[in-house]
Image (cartoon, rainbow, N blue to C red):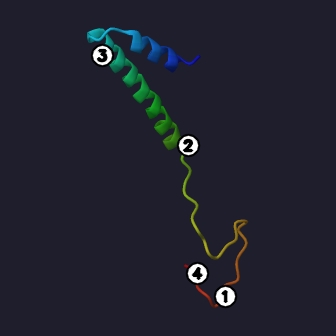
């Protein structure tokens, strides 16, 4: 059973009031922190975009230019 399911079950059983609202606020803050972690990881491992170079192959060999131009 997941922590989230346990929390939801517990939250549903709680009486309405300040404690229930505090519990929801706490959980939502943790949820936001969890999603920020993915953004941080994505930014940290971001690679430089591949730049197209029309005069070399991926292996770095020179390409003979033809009369057609590439876009």
Task: Report the Cα–Cα distance between label 3 and label 2.
Answer: 37 Å
Q: Which of the labelled discs sits on residue 70, or is there none?
A: 4
For disc 1, the marked residue is 66
Q: CA–CA distance between discs 1 and 2?
A: 38 Å
Of the image marks 1 and 3, the number of the one nearer the N terminus: 3
Q: Which residue is tagged 2?
A: 45
Q: Circle 4 sits in a helix, a strand or a loop, which is it?
A: loop
| Label 3 crowd bin: few (<14), some (14–19), many (20+), radius 10 Å | few
Q: Earlier in the sequence, mark 3 or mark 2?
A: 3
Say which of marks 3 and 4 sits in front: 3
Number of disc labels = 4
In the image, what residue occupies the spot 63% across and 91% down? 67
User: At 73% across and 66% down in the image, what residue appears?
Assistant: 59
* Label 3 close to label 4 by CB (< 8 Å): no
SS of the residue under disc 1: loop
Residue contact at pointers 1 and 3, CB within 8 angstroms:
no
> CA gap, disc 3 to disc 4?
60 Å
Q: CA distance from mark 1 to mark 3?
A: 69 Å
Which residue is nearer to you in this view: 36 or 11? 11
Q: Position of residue 10 (x, y in %)?
A: 44, 11
Nearer-N-terminus badge (3/4): 3
For marks 2 and 4, the one nearer the N-term is: 2
Dot 3 corresponds to which residue? 21
Q: 68 or 5, which is in the foreground?
A: 5
Cα–Cα span, label 4 and label 1: 10 Å
Q: Secondary structure at mark 3?
A: helix
Residue 69: name its quadrant: bottom right
Q: Position of residue 42 (x, y in %)?
A: 52, 42
Q: CA distance from mark 2 to mark 4?
A: 31 Å
């Amino acid at each position: 059973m997941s922590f989230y399911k346990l929390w939801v079950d517990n939250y549903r059983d709680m009486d309405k009031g300040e404690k229930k609202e505090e519990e929801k606020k706490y959980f939502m803050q943790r949820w936001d922190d969890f999603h920020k972690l993915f953004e941080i990881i994505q930014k940290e491992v971001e690679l430089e975009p591949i730049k197209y170079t029309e005069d070399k192959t991926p292996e770095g060999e020179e390409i003979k230019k033809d009369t057609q131009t590439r876009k």
